[in-house]
Image (tube, grey):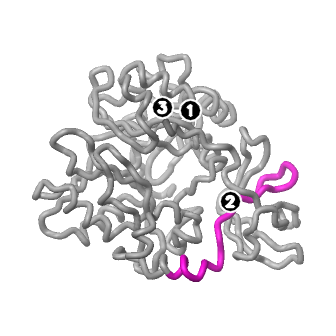
Amino acid sequence: MNNQTTEKTQLYDFHVGHGAKMVPFAGYDMPVQYPLGVMKEHLHCRAAAGLFDVSHMGQAFIIADDGKFETAAAFLETLVPCDVKSLEPGQQRYTQFLNADGGILDDLMVSRLGMDGHQHWIYIVVNAGCKTEDFAHINKHLPDGLKLKILDDMSLIALQGPKAVDVVSKYIPKARTMPFMSSLDVPLDGMWCHISRSGYTGEDGYEIAVKHTDVVKMCELFLSHDEVELIGLGARDSLRLEAGLCLYGHDIDETTSPIEAGLIWSIQKHRRAEGGFIGAERVQKDIAERPVRRRVGIQPDGRAPAREGTIIQNMNGKDIGIITSGGYGPSHGGPVAMGYVKRRFSRVDTEVKLLIRGKAKPAKVVKLPFVANNFYRG
């Protein structure tokens, strides 16, 4: 990464002007923390509202020339295991691109636009580090009559936390009651945006796509509210880890199936049965026979965090798995981790050992998430 040229989001100067420490991440210079510091940023997001720059993510539309949502949805269902066809206008779902072996190429959000005249458009948001490959993957399979429109003129920000609704609804009254995993295409203080009630922190909140030319103004507007503080990648990672949310390239990758990752909930029942998507054979096999390993929460005993790559052992000292994400959970008040263990050791309260700095430390398997999710259910 350090030998590569890093790109900048439209908010680079904004971050630097607010004292951010910038680091290379997924090909971009991104803020890892601000003067407030990772711990306080994390706790502020849990208590009030945190503003994140996620403009490094990839955004695109999939559009059918015949003006029919069903045409675009039928195509996308060949690439992802979720039910796209039943999406109502303004509804959003989480899903994955899979390879032929059922491994996860990337995870993504899929939405059907709710705006009149555009309800046949599908909007997707993919991970920054995978977006070039994702868009190539779509184009490789794209039939005549469909087009992929990459949104290289749009930024993406997130406002997360229990006070986010109070801030956003001052400008978009409808935002107060919009359900979790729904979206609107509306102006916010005169700036047109696509806003979804979703996020990556386990808290209530919104992700907002806005034109590059408006994003600084929008961030300044949000930051003018006392409830809002800027939050960097450091706290973003600890927030999502406490919430039990997967990070691509760490907790899920091309070797991982959605079933062993605990993501079966994202595959609707009829799609599990019918298949029809790339990688379906592996998914159906894992459902029928149960995978040999499972993603679990791990609670280390004591204060020492278990970092990614830490070996998990059974009580007899035999290797049974590996930590894929780990660190300190400020809201949880101690170390938290996720990883994969052999299935027979995946039951909650199973005692295990973690090899930390060459020493076996006690830990146990726990139910995810570490901190209860506060998504708005209406």
Residue at x 47% of width, y 54% of height: 26
When the figure is inspected, residue 40 is found, relative to residue 9, above or below; the finding is above
When the figure is inspected, residue 99 is found, relative to residue 361, above or below; the finding is below
In the image, 248: left or right of 90?
A: right
| Magenta span contains residue 5 | no
Which span is picked out in magenta? 285-308
Q: Please, what is the three-letter code of the amino acid marked with disc 1?
A: Gly
Q: Earlier in the sequence, mark 1 or mark 2?
A: 1
Q: Where is residue 169 in the image (x, y as percent from the top left)?
A: 42, 23
Query: What's the CA distance linking mark 3 and mark 2?
Result: 30 Å
Q: Position of residue 228 (x, y in %)?
A: 53, 24
**In this orientation, does residue 142 appear?**
yes
When the figure is inspected, residue 52 is found, relative to residue 176, above or below; the finding is below
Query: What's the CA distance linking mark 3 and mark 1?
Result: 20 Å
The residue where tag 2 is placed is 338
| Magenta span contains residue 306 | yes
The residue where tag 1 is placed is 161
Q: Nearer the viewer, residue 174 or 57?
A: 174
Q: Please, what is the three-letter code of the amino acid marked with disc 2?
A: Met
Query: What's the CA distance linking mark 1 and mark 2?
Result: 23 Å
Asked whether disc 3 touches disc 1, contact meaning CB atoms under 8 Å apart, the reply is no
